[in-house]
Amino acid sequence: MFSGMTNHSIDAKGRIVLPARFREQLGETYYLARGFGNKCIQVMSSEQFNAMCEKILALPANLSMAVQYTFNATAVEVTPNAQGRVIIPQSLREFAEIEGDAVVIGMTNRLEIWSKKNYEDYVASQNENLALALKELKL
């Protein structure tokens, strides 16, 4: 399970170092892909990515294709180098609007990489949904 948040920077070559505790859970190779509905990059273990692909293929064909064009087509398998760095493809960095400062967030079964500004803006926009969720959870 992934939890927590860490601040990072993307170097001039588009590389990021994920925290060692996350890398251990992800395994030797893992996947980067566009976020679902948010301008972020999802990071998934191979097992999680394959499970997601199976769910996508089980959808009706028109829905499956829509997800495949935006998720599967953007996915890239990565292997960290000796320093733990992975290259985030330029197309994913542009989609997520990440230049320089980034935030890596644990999202239970995956990670997300956000530009710091986009993450802060998104969280600030979620006050109403947060209140509804807390009410549903009876907190």
Image: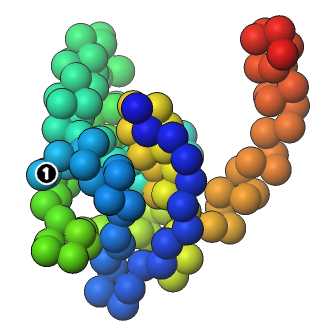
Q: Nearer the viewer, residue 56 or 109?
A: 109
Above-or-below relation of 58 to 123: above
Residue at position x 36%, y 63% in the image: 18
Which residue matches tag 1? 29
**Label 1 crowding class (10 Å Cα cut-off): few <14, some 14-19, many 20+?**
few
Residue at position x 23%, y 69% in the image: 84
Coloured how? rainbow
Is residue 42 among what the camera can see? yes
**Residue 36's x, y, as percent?**
47, 39
Secondary-structure class at tag 1: loop
Residue at position x 77%, y 20% in the image: 133
Above-or-below relation of 93 to 112: below
Q: Quadrant of the C terminus?
A: top right
Compared across the picture, whether 70 is left or right of 132 comes to: left
Q: Amino acid at mark 1?
A: Thr
Is residue 69 among what the camera can see? no
**Residue 58's x, y, as percent?**
24, 11
Compared across the picture, whether 99 is left or right of 127 comes to: left
* Total numbered circles: 1
Compared across the picture, whether 23 is left or right of 106 comes to: left
Q: Nearer the viewer, residue 27 or 103?
A: 27
The single residue placed furthest to the bottom in the displayed view is: 12
**Residue 26's x, y, as percent?**
25, 45
**Residue 91's x, y, as percent?**
33, 67
